[in-house]
Amino acid sequence: MPGEGVSFIAHGHILRYEEIVRIAGIFARLGIRKVRITGGEPLVRKGLPFLFEKLGRISGIDELTLTTNGTLLAPVTGRLGDAGVKRVNISLDSLENACYRLITGFDRLRDVHEGIDKAIEAGMAVKLNVVAMRGINDGEFVSFVRFAIDRSIDVRFIELMRGRYNGDFVRDRFLSSEEVYRRLCGEFTLIPVSPSYGSTTEKSYSVSGTAVRVGLISGVSDPFCGRCNKVRLMSQGVLKTCLFDTGGINLRDMLRGGLSEEEIEEKIKKAVEGRSEGPAQGKNPEGPGESELVMHRTGG
Ligand code: SF4
């Protein structure tokens, strides 16, 4: 998020839950099997478990997951579990109070811990998403793996990506997956394994002697565009076939404009067929140009 704050979008411009469910139904007919709700922070939206309940009833969708910062998770884990959410990714870049506060601007680390514990209690598979940042959390990688071992959860380290607001930051703080791997190898024996849940974007390792997996996501140093199979639906209805798409068709306008679901299906097919693959300026922290990527709107 930019430090000076963000401009809010008028409520009427945002997809209603019924619209999201209709669009998910169209995608299910096109062969999509997995839906992840991400953000911004998805749990700030009222009644999110209700959306999962509706999505869980769509024929063809067999996996529902959530990416959250974890601060609002604890009170809703029971309902999310009942709605069929079996996995949750929690974005957490520091385990130390002062560093967490520096990164997020909030004092909510205890709430995140509670969210993690409750999700585990509710039987969900928990994965921590840690963005590796030089000079900020690079002293904590080993602690993150120990934290994961103590709770039998997974952890993955993600390379910083350049977006519209963070060019200088990325230049100073970028740390490659290779370096994260080297540091972890000083403490643990990492055995390469196939990525869990068919992930096409991470290199996975099991930590010898434990049930824990460590993932490395190297979107910058070793791009995986050729294996990427995700599409994203933005809160205002824009379909992005790549994180770096600057355009995209608007499915909300099509629904509200009265297009039939078959017509929308055709538009989606065309957009996916014409998909571009990760423009270089978004992938190279040293490279020229400004990426249009705005993570607090696009989600992970
Ligand atoms: S840049 Fe686009 S195509 Fe490449 S991995 Fe990211 S979303 Fe997929």
Image (cartoon, helix red, strand yellow):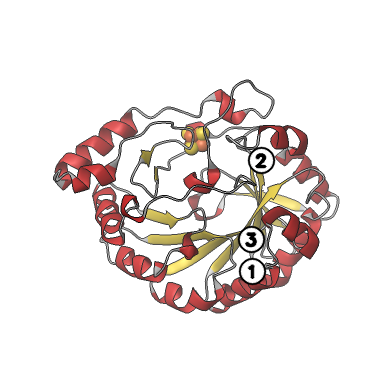
Residue at label 3? 154
x and y percentages locating residue 128 in the rendered image: 63, 59
- The vertical placement of 189 against 290, above or below, is below
From the image, tell me which residue sits under label 1: 112
User: Residue shown at 37%/52% (left/top)?
Assistant: 10
Q: Secondary structure at mark 3?
A: strand
Nearer to us: label 1 or label 3:
1
Give me the C-alpha separation between circle 2 and circle 1.
Answer: 22 Å
Q: Nearer the viewer, mark 2 or mark 3?
A: 2
Note whether residue 287 is visible: yes
Amino acid type indicated by mark 1: Val
Q: Could you tell me which secondary element the residue under label 2 belongs to?
A: loop
Disc 1/disc 3 C-alpha distance (Å): 16 Å
Q: Earlier in the sequence, mark 2 or mark 1?
A: 1
Q: Looking at this view, is 269 or 13 the one in front?
A: 13
Residue 160: numbered disc: 2
> From the viewer's perspective, is 109 left or right of 16?
right
Residue 208 at least partly seen? no
**Alpha-carbon neighbours of circle 3 within 10 Å: few (<14), some, or many (≥20)?**
many
> Of the residues under marks 1 and 3, which one precedes in the sequence?
1
* Number of residue marks: 3
Task: Look at the picture and state if 126 lies above or below 294.
Answer: below
Q: Tell me the amino acid under the disc marked 3.
A: Asp
- Label 2, label 3: how many angstroms apart (C-alpha)? 19 Å
Q: Quadrant of residue 149?
A: bottom right
Which x, y percent locates residue 42? Answer: 47, 60
At label 2, the amino acid type is Leu
